[in-house]
Image (cartoon, helix red, strand yellow):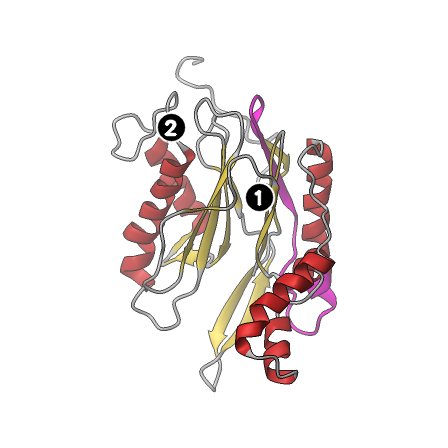
Amino acid sequence: MTIAISLKVNDGLVLAADSASTFFLQGPDGKPVTFNVYNHANKVFNLVKGLPIGVITWGAGSIGTSSIETLMKDLRLKLSTPGDASAIDRQSYQMQDVAKAVRRFFFDERYHPSLSGRPDAPELGFIIAGYSSGQSMAEEFEVSMRGAACPDPVPVRALPECGLKWAGMLEPISRLILGYGTGLPNVLEARLGVPREQVQPAMQVIQQSLEAPLVVPPMPIQDAIDLAEFLVELTAKFYRFLPGAQSVGGPIEIAVITKHEHFKWIKRKHYYSSALNPPLPTPSEA
């Protein structure tokens, strides 16, 4: 399971996620049972090296025998290789087109052929975030697939707007930010007898009355980083103490995308030592 955060302020974007990856087996009753939780999955990516484009993922950790991390690197190679049908023009690209490329690669070419016919096909979601060529404000697009359904990329918010998007394990942050848990609509209807047509208007009033405005557009990037990290930590600790498997946890990874500094890692894990594996020279440096 996952908590994935995309936090946008005037000066840029913060992407943050945990590292837990939960594996399930089918129980005697046919329902999934947690088999193990590993704490070293990668969920934040710089989609095109050298460009202010990032991706964060939640849901399925693999398609077939390939992890989402490996597939994301396959896509990066296609986007970065001149002459490839999916290659982007580094001097003139739009984030919406990048999001469409993510959808095409993951859903049309990978997920749909492998999983869309299965009744237990897992959800797989992405937020593609960054700056279009020449654009001064960051953009975010969501791509989400389950079964045979995968709508076109959807803007997370209007271009000039700032705010917070969280995906994956929603409960802790929903309670903190919105002031209520994800089960409240069902409680209103099933337990309190609120007519179905009145539930949504009631939820709007509740949210307007209780929502905590933690994100403000002029927030400095460092404060946005701190807030994103806090929200991931909050979610991990919530599920640490909640009975059941700790489905959110492991190292926190954080990346920042800004207009001038582009994609920068703030916290990142490696399974190898960079001191033992220095970067290889590029052909121009060799």
Residue 191 % position (x, y): 64, 84
Q: Give yes or no for contact between labels 1 and 2 (Cβ–Cβ under 8 Å).
A: no
Q: Quadrant of residue 74?
A: top left
Residue at point 53% right, 33% down? Answer: 138
Q: Quadrant of the C terminus?
A: top left
Relative to residue 89, is residue 5 drawn left or right? right
Amino acid type, mark 2? Tyr
Report the side of 19 relative to 141 (left or right). right
Give the residue displayed 36% in from the left and 49% down from the top.
152
Residue 236 visible to an observer of this rendering: no
Q: Nearer the viewer, residue 83 or 25?
A: 83
Image coordinates for residue 269, horizontal then vertical, percent: 61, 42
Which residue is pictured at 48% across the width and 80% down the height? Answer: 31
Q: Secondary structure at mark 2?
A: loop
- Of badges 1 and 2, the one in the foreground is 2
Question: Which is more N-terminal, label 2 or label 1?
Answer: 2
Q: Which mark is residue 95?
A: none
Amino acid type indicated by mark 1: Tyr
- For disc 1, the neighbor class at 10 Å (few under 14, some 14 to 19, many from 20) is few
Where does label 1 land, which residue? 271
- Image position, residue 217 (x, y; %): 66, 36
Residue 123 position by quadrant = bottom left
In this rendering, the count of numbered labels is 2
The CA distance from mark 1 to mark 2 is: 33 Å
How busy is the neighbourhood of tag 2: few (under 14 within 10 Å), some, or many (20 plus)? Answer: some
Q: Indicate the secondary structure of the residue bearing disc 1.
A: loop
In magenta segment, residue 202: no
Q: Is residue 182 above or below residue 264?
A: below
Q: Which residue is mark 2?
A: 93
Which span is picked out in magenta? 238-263
Q: Quadrant of the N terminus?
A: bottom right
